[in-house]
Amino acid sequence: MARRIGLLGGTFNPVHIGHLRAALEVAEYMGLDELRLIPSARPPHRETPQASAEQRLAMVELAVAGESLLKVDDRELQRDKPSFTYDTLESVRGELAADDQLFLLLGWDAFCGLPSWHRWQELLEHCHILVLQRPDTGNEPPEALRDLLAARSENDPLSLLGPGGQISFIWQTPLAVSATQVRQLLAQGRSVRYLVPDAVLAYIHAHGLYRE
């Protein structure tokens, strides 16, 4: 049988319950064999993270320990160049069987920014795209994406067929937490308990991360 693999990339600076809950909900809903969290080393669209690549990787590994559906993939940290999603998809696809399904998870904001990505129009050659849309997301996608959506959208994400090539939307339970919020609270000396897993919080304190 074809395997079903999900990918969720990000700086994870730090990983928090919003990342983890979204990943687990999608993995269960889509019946994935596994969902891989992929920390980026040098994200081309963001500033260099405060925590090192090794520290962010360690936090993600601690966060998913004991959850069989969620895995950690460190391939982007092995590259000595910016983390382009196209390169990651090409690399993962090269390790899978031809009929395995690959799903790239993107938040709504990331999806709307897709036209600025490296080789963005070729991403669907390697995967399906699942857009994680919260109930409070009411914005229209940019014009550059409208033709793509008209040609490649599938209303029901459970109906996506083949190894890749289509786009679908999954409604998400809204969790109003962000890595920026977590870093700001820590910088102010305030508690972030229940916003990050306890093991991640212990790691942050042990390494003195995100202090002013």
Image (tube, rainbow, N blue to C red):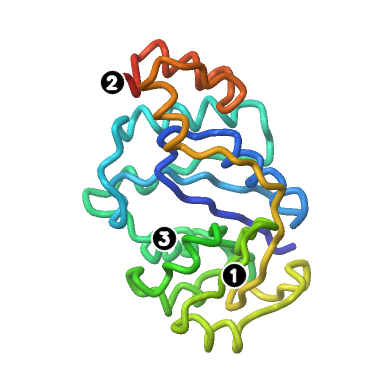
Q: Earlier in the sequence, mark 3 or mark 2?
A: 3
Q: Is residue 202 left or right of residue 11?
A: right
**Residue lying at 62% horizontally and 23% vertically, measured from the top left:** 194
Q: Nearer the viewer, residue 105 or 33?
A: 105
Q: Is residue 208 left or right of residue 10?
A: left
Which residue, given by chain and number where applicable, does mark 3 sit on?
91
Q: Secondary structure at mark 2?
A: loop
**Residue lying at 41% horizontally and 58% vertically, measured from the top left:** 88
Q: Residue 43 in the image: x percent, y percent?
A: 31, 51
Q: Residue 44 in the image: x percent, y percent?
A: 28, 56
Which residue, given by chain and number where applicable, does mark 1 sit on?
128
Structural crowding at the residue carrying mark 2, measured as other residues with C-alpha within 10 Å and reported as few (<14), some (14–19) or many (≥20): few
Structural crowding at the residue carrying mark 1, measured as other residues with C-alpha within 10 Å and reported as few (<14), some (14–19) or many (≥20): many
Q: Which mark is residue 81?
A: none
Contact (CB < 8 A) between labels 2 and 1?
A: no
Quadrant assignment for the C terminus: top left
Q: Secondary structure at mark 1?
A: strand
Disc 3/disc 2 C-alpha distance (Å): 38 Å
Q: Residue 8 in the image: x percent, y percent?
A: 53, 51
Which residue, given by chain and number where applicable, does mark 2 sit on?
212
